[in-house]
Amino acid sequence: MKRSWLISAAIVVVVGGLLALGYTTREKNGSVNITAVGSTALQPLVEAAGEDYAAKNMGVFVNVQGGGTGTGLAQVQQGAVDLGNSDMFAEEKDGIKANQLVDHKVAIVGIAPMLNKQANIKNLTQDQLIAIFTKKVTNWKQVGGADLPIVLVNRVSGSGTRATFEKWGLKGAESADAQEQDSSGMVRSIVSTTPGAVSYAAFAYLDKTVSVPTLNGVKADDDNVKDGKWPIWSYEHVYTKGKPTKDVQAFLDFIDSKHIQTTLVPQLGYIAIHDMEISRDVNGKITSEN
Amino acid sequence: MDNIRESLLKQSAATRKDRFGRYISLAALLLIVVVVLSIFWFVASKGLATFFANKVNLWDFLTGTKWAPGQKDANGHPFVGAAPMIVGSFLVTLISALIATPFAIGTAVFMTEISPKRGAKILGPVTELLVGIPSVVYGFIGLSVIVPVMRHLFGGSGFGILAGAMVLFVMILPTVTSMTVDTLKSVPRHYRESSLALGATRWQMIYKVILRAATPGILTAVVFGMARAFGEALAVQMVVGNAALMPQNLTSPAATLTSVLTQGIGNTVMGSLENNALWSLALILLLMSLVFNSVIRAIAKKGAM
Amino acid sequence: MLNPKQADKIASAILYAIAGFVILILAALLGYILYQGVPHLSWHFLTAPATAFTAGGGIGIQLFNSLYLLVITMLISFPIALGAGIYLNEYANKKSRATALIRTAIEILSSLPSVVVGLFGFLLFVVQFKLGFSILSGAISLTFFNLPLLTRSVEESLRTIPDLQREAGAALGLSRWETVGHIILPAALPSIVTGVVLSAGRVFGEAAALIYTAGQSAPALDFTDWNPFNVSSPLNIMRPAETLAVHIWKVNSEGIMPDAAAVSAGSSAVLIIAVLLFNFFARYLSGVLFKRLTATK
């Protein structure tokens, strides 16, 4: 009995000693912590940029988490985090006081409809697209495809991708009630495995397991987004509460810099903000950049 | 004299230690209770806000069949009908429990009464292993195996209540089985011995003695399985289809409380109606499992008598 | 009407069939995961850090995070569950309303969807207590999620010890606490260990509760720096830590690396193998402990 007490006491002393030693010898860098929360679609970009930035600036640590656009905007509004990543304008989100937040647009994301290959469709007009998503058309043969019932797959309501798709792809029409999924990867794997399925996703997620039709004859690619021929795209926003602090501003400038915009942004499937020949405000008003 | 008197009146070291141990273990228990209460309070305060702060009618909430909290109908009331999800949750849970129970009991009886050696060697470790498979993986197997099978058998897209129930069946099977095994093992040995001594066959012993004696425990195991099925989100969400529509049949896309909750929570803003409505779903989830629990408790009590 | 002997034979056959079928399902499930995943495993995959958008990423940091988080979670939750289990089975008045109420509360907690636990942890620990996205926040949230199951299994293990043992302890003049410590716990240890393994498996595979608490990013770690107070030290409990299960979830839902399917399948296989190894180790440990703590040979 006595011995086991001695041993436990010795262990406590050793562990305590090691902890104390660690505490006194820790690296004392007056570190800057920048925390970003929000859109899972934007997370990889900010995270990769953050790692790059931290490597170049000693003592700066950028902590990037997902959680969804709603979480990001709500937390940045409360001041719980420094940056709120969002797929949509803060004005478009219920319950957010957009006038308190400052918008920093960091990239453009193009969104395209994607179909299961068995649908056998090469081109859709926008009216056909609307008819499909409002269930006015229920079989692919009605729009020139195979004889196969249409299976709608939506993103969950409140997702930025869905909001953008409905606003610009369906000209503001609400998609009919259907299956919903909350992530692009899931939507893609459902579309690729379910005969007759149709959904939409950001360009980065389109791969050879699904087919992407042209819309009114326009191909879904970066160049057509840049000059405004392809209508379905949105900005990726990073919001701060009020004017950002010096450290945060420096990081935002870094994301906006040529270095990031020409390397990471295209690598992750986005379109650089500087490449756009047009700009669009929250009300959808389009102005030419040049 | 005084020494003896003192040592007789004073508490012994063992008593003090006993009291100490008792308080420590009580403190641990109370900590859990505090945790439960704080989560309750948290969910309830958020979930009730839909009815108090956003003035949604409780009855409309429970019986409405259209779920689109962002939209408003002609009278300016938001569409927050939770009935499709409530029905969906109940259906997947009940169907999966109905399928899993006979399999779990059969396997457990096999493991304890018929072939304890093989049971302990093969089935035991395997069931424990299965509990450790993350639900995402179950969901993906459901998506790549069960959904196509459903599509093949019943037509349609394959997503639906039945697909969800099949995935849950596999997920809760290990839990229910291993808990049933525990219950069967705790049936005293002399029950078995005396029934065999009376000339009963093995099956008569199992059916008339052991299963009867273990009924309350088995019911608890099933409830635990159902509780897990009820609260499971990620796996179900991948195969159930997540369409907040009243289920027309077992193979049409449907939604459960958890799938809608998990998907929506990150995309809504804390404090808004959309967000509060989701917390109301969580509250329903809590209350429904409370009801489940007390019903089974009553059955178990009856069985014990 | 069947005679009892025939009924016995038929019932046995059915039971064999059921057990066989269940083994078949379980084996198929495990086989499927391993078959899909094992070809992707390599030393590089197990040790390299993950990549966001290029092929060839590994899961080294995630694997370490999962194990470390599991250890921390167990350090917090096991003593609490042990204490609560002991009180419920050894001290509490089993007939009292309060005990029944507490038991119900625990069962309710276990049926909570883990995403609710995660959000609760997010709002309380991450935001309110300013612990940030960290291993500590994640471990506390996992503790909430883990406690009901663990408490129940401890209680269940203690219950299977016959009262004879308690009476024997009392007859020897031991106090209740000493009986528990010296007789009941050693006897119940193997099944307690099994319970811990079961719940460890669940903790290991849990994703939803961690997304909002331990976070979904895995900053690079410096594996030569074991000082728990340094930011890049693997032992730092205040750093964000994406676990393997969260990684699988993230890769499946938003991953844009070209080999996402392979990473996900490989990670799932690693997860299963890790649980398997853990399982064997625990079995071995419980056997050794049982021999040492009791007079059994």
Image: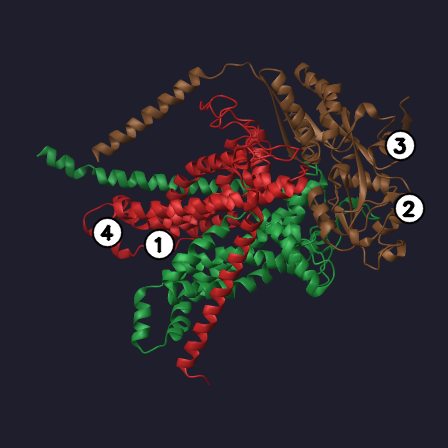
What kind of element bears circle 2? loop
Closest to the camera, between mark 1 and mark 4, is 4
> Which shade is chain B?
green
Q: CA distance from mark 2 to mark 1?
A: 69 Å
Given residues B132 and C93, the one toward you in this image is B132
Chain C: drawing colour: red
In this orientation, which residue lies closer to the viewer: C102 or C31? C31
Q: Which mark is residue C159?
A: 1
- Mark in the foreground, 2 or 1: 2
A170 lies above or below A44: below
Residue type (three-letter) at the residue carrying disc 3: Gly
Q: Which residue is at 84% across, 54% downward?
A: A135
Q: Are marks 3 and 1 on the same chain?
A: no
Q: Is residue A143 left or right of residue B185?
A: right
Chain bearing mark 4: C
Asked if the residue at tag 4 contacts the one at tag 1, i.e. Cβ–Cβ closer than 8 Å, the answer is no
The residue lying at 56 percent from left, 30 percent from top is C240
The residue at which mark 2 appears reads as A125
Residue type at mark 1 is Arg
* Disc 4 target residue: C297
